[in-house]
């Protein structure tokens, strides 16, 4: 019988010794797999999520290249005519009343001509990890038998135009100012949903009449304090109603929407993904003008992040376009420049200093020296509540991978060792209580398994 960790149960379920992590992680991805794609978690998230799928493909690339390719293909089948890759592609076979807001509430295909006609999707997007995953699929195929290399090359050829359209959408519709920073319309787009990064902007949103709704997410976790609060959900649902009123039209949203944030983490991931896209463009022999354009996005992105650097905090800050001010909150997103790469020695040193300080991974109350999603020094910090404090393996992956690219293999290896140690002890939880290491949220989270697979497979010197 396959070993597994029942979702929704609290307490520790050890994954066993380090050598057991790989097969157990593969087992999570297998059980969460549906046809050609993978649910982020068995019951809490029954649809296909955008950046989850990219991380999942990254992990799958090491154990089942075909599934990794299919994961990306099925997500891209939901791409909008604008190039937007939606944050959720709905699973028509998900049990009724299993996730809210559902396809009916988004109603995107009825409201927007840009939405795909063949699949039902949400109207938002999420950080663009996809090109990084596609490059991993290529990397894990290179040097193998000719047939496999050719298949991977064909996959790159078929997906390059989709990735290019996606990044162009982000560089244009989501950055009409040409700032290099991506504007998000909703905390869900950031992927760090209830992070205090969004508190000030959300507080100034006046909530109107929301059609009645029931939260099904609370059925699937051991304790509601792991999830965003009802007050936060009201704001999320109200913003959704406003986006629907504008029929998901970018220009109209830009005109009227009360929540317009320049998200530094999203923007930094786009920079890193653009670097991957340049490599993909070269493999498929794309036009030089394409490559030059992508390179200009990279330069602009790094420039935009540099402007948001806060010398005193040693972190990069999001920017509220409506309030015309930066959000001075210490969260994991502040390490964005590390993810974007090409840092000066000085900036890299400052970021590592902040990372190792008591504000983050050096806090002496931590069970393991891994950065909490929000600094324990923040008044809004909460050790059990989702993105307000818990440690997220997927965020650790971003830092690990970025530190390797920054030429800091020893620092990266440290994060890798602790992350693998945490899942070996606590299982493939969605997130962990930082002071006790208690697994929280879903206990069979696909992207946790996927990043463990990638960390185990990739040498710290060469990610
Ligand atoms: C969480 O977000 C969804 C909404 O998109 C939710 O809370 O219902 C976030 O952690 C997000 O980053 C992630 O992609 C999603 C699925 O794992 O769950």
Image (tube, helix red, strand yellow):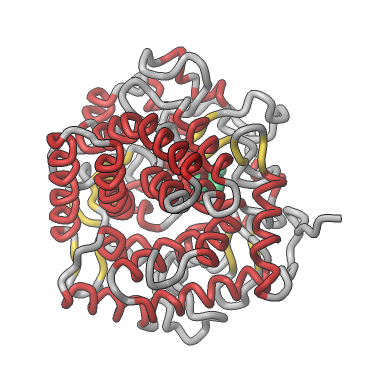
Quarter of the C terminus within the rendering: bottom left
Residue 231 visible somewhere in the drawing = no
**Front-most of residues 248 and 206:** 248
Point out residue 124 in the picture as x, y percentages from the top left corner: 41, 33
Q: For the point 72% across and 30% down, which residue is it?
A: 95
Q: For the point 40% across and 58% down, which residue is it?
A: 196
**Front-most of residues 77 and 137:** 137
Point out residue 329 in the picture as x, y percentages from the top left corner: 32, 64
Quarter of the N terminus within the rendering: bottom right
User: Which image quadrant is residue 306 in?
Assistant: bottom left
**Front-most of residues 346 and 208:** 346
Point out residue 186 in the picture as x, y percentages from the top left corner: 38, 40
Most distant residue in the front direction: 146
Q: Viewed as shown, does residue 179 lie left or right of 186?
A: left
Q: Viewed as shown, does residue 302 lie left or right of 105?
A: left
Q: Viewed as shown, does residue 17 lie left or right of 407?
A: right
Total labels drawn: 0
Point out residue 184 in the picture as x, y percentages from the top left corner: 32, 41
Q: For the point 52% across and 50% down, which residue is it?
A: 61
Residue 400 visible somewhere in the drawing = yes
Above/below status of 346 relative to 446? below
Q: For the point 57% across and 60% down, which residue is it?
A: 453
Most distant residue in the right direction: 1
User: Which image quadrant is residue 212 in?
Assistant: top right
């Amino acid at each position: 019988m396959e070993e597994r960790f029942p979702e929704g149960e609290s307490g520790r379920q050890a994954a066993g010794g380090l050598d057991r992590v790989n097969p157990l992680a593969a087992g999570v991805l297998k059980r969460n797999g549906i046809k050609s794609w993978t649910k982020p978690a068995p019951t809490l998230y029954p649809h296909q999520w955008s950046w989850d799928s990219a991380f999942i493909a990254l992990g799958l690339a090491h154990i089942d290249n075909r599934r990794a390719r299919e994961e990306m293909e099925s997500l891209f089948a939901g791409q909008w005519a604008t190039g937007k890759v939606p944050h959720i592609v709905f699973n028509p076979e998900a049990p009724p009343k299993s996730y809210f807001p559902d396809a009916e509430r988004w109603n995107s295909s009825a409201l927007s001509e840009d939405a795909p006609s063949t699949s039902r999707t949400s109207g938002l997007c999420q950080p663009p990890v996809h090109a990084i995953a596609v490059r991993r699929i290529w990397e894990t195929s290179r040097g193998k038998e000719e047939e496999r290399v050719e298949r991977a090359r064909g996959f790159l050829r078929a997906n390059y135009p989709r990735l290019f359209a996606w990044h162009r959408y982000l560089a244009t519709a989501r950055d009409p100012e040409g700032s290099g920073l991506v504007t998000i319309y909703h905390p869900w787009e950031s992927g760090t949903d209830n992070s205090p990064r969004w508190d000030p902007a959300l507080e100034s949103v006046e909530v109107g009449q929301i059609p009645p709704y029931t939260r099904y997410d609370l059925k699937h976790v051991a304790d509601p304090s792991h999830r965003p609060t009802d007050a936060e959900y009201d704001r999320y649902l109200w913003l959704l109603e406003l986006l629907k009123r504008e029929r998901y039209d970018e220009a109209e949203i830009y005109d009227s929407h009360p929540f317009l944030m320049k998200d530094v983490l999203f923007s930094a991931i786009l920079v890193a993904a653009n670097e991957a896209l340049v490599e993909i463009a070269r493999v498929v022999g794309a036009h030089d003008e394409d490559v030059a354009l992508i390179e200009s996005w990279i330069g602009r992105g790094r420039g935009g992040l540099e402007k948001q650097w806060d010398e005193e905090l040693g972190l990069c800050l999001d920017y509220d376009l409506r309030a015309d001010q930066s959000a001075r909150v210490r969260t994991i997103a502040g390490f964005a420049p590390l993810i974007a790469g090409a840092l000066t020695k000085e900036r890299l040193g400052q970021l590592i200093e902040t990372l190792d300080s008591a504000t983050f991974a050096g806090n002496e109350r931590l069970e393991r020296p891994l950065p909490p999603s929000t600094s324990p020094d923040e008044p809004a910090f909460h050790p059990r509540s989702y993105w307000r404090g818990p440690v997220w393996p997927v965020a650790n992956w971003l830092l690990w991978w970025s530190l390797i690219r920054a030429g800091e293999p020893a620092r990266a290896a440290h994060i890798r060792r602790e992350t693998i140690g945490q899942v070996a002890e606590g299982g493939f939880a969605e997130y962990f209580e930082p002071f006790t290491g208690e697994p929280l949220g879903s206990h069979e989270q696909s992207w946790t398994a996927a990043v463990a697979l990638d960390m185990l497979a990739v040498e710290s010197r060469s990610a």
